[in-house]
């Protein structure tokens, strides 16, 4: 569930994005019902993305349903996906639009309120739980992994006595990020054989620890530490939450965040392979394949605290808005979460200017200021979220239809980044 980027081996970006993930529209708002374009969206060439406007310019184009439909259609044509949905909130006004199909060959539009696998956006929910426990004095960000999980992170140069909770949250631990396609499959045939396979995340941790770390953990106070996305770290955070509370990490996330915020479309499904309705189908084009593989129904038990969450655009908007306006964390913990470091060159080429906090991503906006959120990638889907500094404006984008082709992944990422920038910088 890592952010999309070329890599020597294809990974399910969203889990472990590899997943990184920016998001969505508020629960307290009533989303406008917007008609969808015909199946397949507007043909390429009939819609063009608008330039990123300066919101301070009175002539900046207003956010309208028609404008958002055009943006969605243009993004779909560029990404060559099956379906796309975008939701934008400006203050108390929410606009949503879709393009393409919810399921190949049906002509059904991508539904508003669809449930989807949020992939690495899960990390932000887990990070909030860890920071709440820190605020309660039940753990410290400076606690070592060895303190909570004695004897687990050792061997091959790995040393849990040097890795802190903060390192895990910020991806500065250096821990190897295991290629989870070894469990989920790198071809269409392998995926079909393994789609219902329930892999315990502890197996992935054990496999990762058979490799040496990429670099030593960041030194305290290092202003520019080495950074490398590692789902392994979030698997360990799930174990630490369980040790600190005596309860499964998923129950802590549910009781501390999902239920209090009324996120009725959000769930941690465990081994349940089915998405609740309504939902759009997800499709992946594996290497060497010319057609799509439907990846909608699958076990996500292996993703655990790194990427198992199912949610909606509405719920993600409500979550990140509550986070950024201080309703989920005390000021000290929120400030720690928003303290960021630069990502590595591999991620920079896809997400220019990105910096990573504690389970939270930050990127500069072309109109000034920053956008916050988290990305989520998985076989068959992209989830992108973005929130302005004060949380007044937000955007959540979901795309169904993904490829393993590195060049096309870069095209898709640039298109989605541009769509988010225009949504957040428009009037």
Image (cartoon, rainbow, N blue to C red):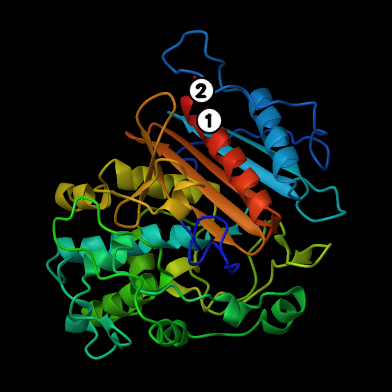
User: Residue 84 appears in which quarter of the rendering?
Assistant: top right
Residue 371 placement (x, y as % from top left)? 40, 37
* Disc marking residue 426: 2
Q: Residue at x 73, y 49 (%)?
A: 81
Dot 2 surroundings within 10 Å: few (below 14), some, or many (20 or more)?
Answer: many
The front one of 168 and 219 is 219
User: Residue 13 appears in which quarter of the rendering?
Assistant: bottom right
* Disc marking residue 329: none
Q: Taking 270 as reference, is 173 above or below it?
A: above
Q: Residue at x 64, y 64 (%)?
A: 379
Q: Are marks 2 and 1 in contact (CB under 8 Å)?
A: yes
Q: Taking 335 as reference, is 276 above or below it?
A: below
Tell me the element at label 2: loop
Query: Can I make out residue 20 in this image?
Result: yes
Dot 1 surroundings within 10 Å: few (below 14), some, or many (20 or more)?
Answer: many
Q: Residue at x 53, y 30 (%)?
A: 423
Q: Residue at x 37, y 70 (%)?
A: 234
Tell me the element at label 1: helix
Q: How many marks?
A: 2
Q: Is residue 5 left or right of residue 406?
A: left
User: Label 2, label 1: how many angstroms apart (C-alpha)?
Assistant: 6 Å
The residue that label 1 is drawn on is: 423
């Amino acid at each position: 569930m890592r952010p999309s980027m070329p890599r020597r081996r294809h990974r399910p970006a969203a889990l472990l994005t590899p997943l990184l993930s920016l998001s969505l529209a508020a629960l307290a708002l009533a989303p406008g019902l917007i008609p969808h374009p015909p199946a397949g969206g507007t043909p390429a060439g009939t819609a063009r993305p608008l330039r990123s406007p300066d919101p301070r310019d009175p002539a900046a184009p207003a956010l309208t349903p028609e404008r958002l439909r055009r943006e969605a259609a243009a993004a779909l044509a560029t990404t060559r996906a099956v379906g796309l949905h975008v939701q934008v909130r400006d203050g108390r006004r929410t606009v949503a639009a879709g393009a393409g199909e919810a399921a190949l060959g049906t002509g059904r539009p991508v539904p508003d309120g669809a449930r989807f696998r949020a992939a690495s956006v899960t990390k932000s929910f887990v990070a909030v739980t860890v920071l709440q426990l820190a605020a309660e004095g039940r753990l410290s960000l400076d606690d070592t992994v060895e303190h909570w999980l004695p004897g687990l992170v050792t061997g091959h140069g790995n040393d849990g006595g040097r890795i802190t909770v903060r390192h895990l949250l910020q991806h500065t631990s250096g821990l190897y990020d295991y290629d989870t396609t070894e469990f989920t499959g790198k071809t269409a045939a392998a995926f079909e054989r393994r789609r219902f396979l329930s892999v315990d995340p502890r197996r992935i941790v054990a496999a990762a620890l058979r490799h040496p770390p990429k670099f030593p953990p960041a030194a305290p106070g290092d202003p520019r530490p080495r950074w490398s996305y590692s789902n392994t770290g979030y698997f360990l955070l799930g174990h630490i939450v369980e040790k600190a509370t005596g309860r499964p990490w998923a129950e802590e996330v549910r009781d501390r965040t999902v239920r209090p915020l009324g996120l009725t479309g959000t769930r941690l499904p465990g081994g349940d392979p089915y998405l609740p309705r309504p939902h759009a189908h997800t499709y992946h084009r594996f290497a060497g394949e010319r057609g799509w593989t439907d990846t909608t129904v699958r076990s996500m038990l292996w993703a655990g605290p790194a990427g198992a969450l199912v949610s909606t655009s509405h719920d993600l908007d409500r979550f990140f808005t509550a986070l950024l306006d201080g309703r989920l964390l005390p000021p000290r913990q929120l400030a720690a979460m928003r303290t960021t470091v630069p990502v590595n060159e591999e991620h920079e080429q896809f997400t220019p200017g990105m910096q990573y906090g504690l389970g939270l991503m930050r990127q500069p906006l072309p109109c000034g200021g920053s956008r916050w959120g988290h990305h989520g990638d998985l076989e068959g889907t992209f989830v992108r979220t973005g929130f302005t500094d004060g949380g007044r404006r937000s955007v959540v984008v979901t795309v169904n239809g993904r490829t393993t082709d590195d060049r096309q992944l870069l095209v898709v990422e640039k298109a989605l980044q541009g769509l988010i920038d225009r949504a957040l910088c428009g009037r």
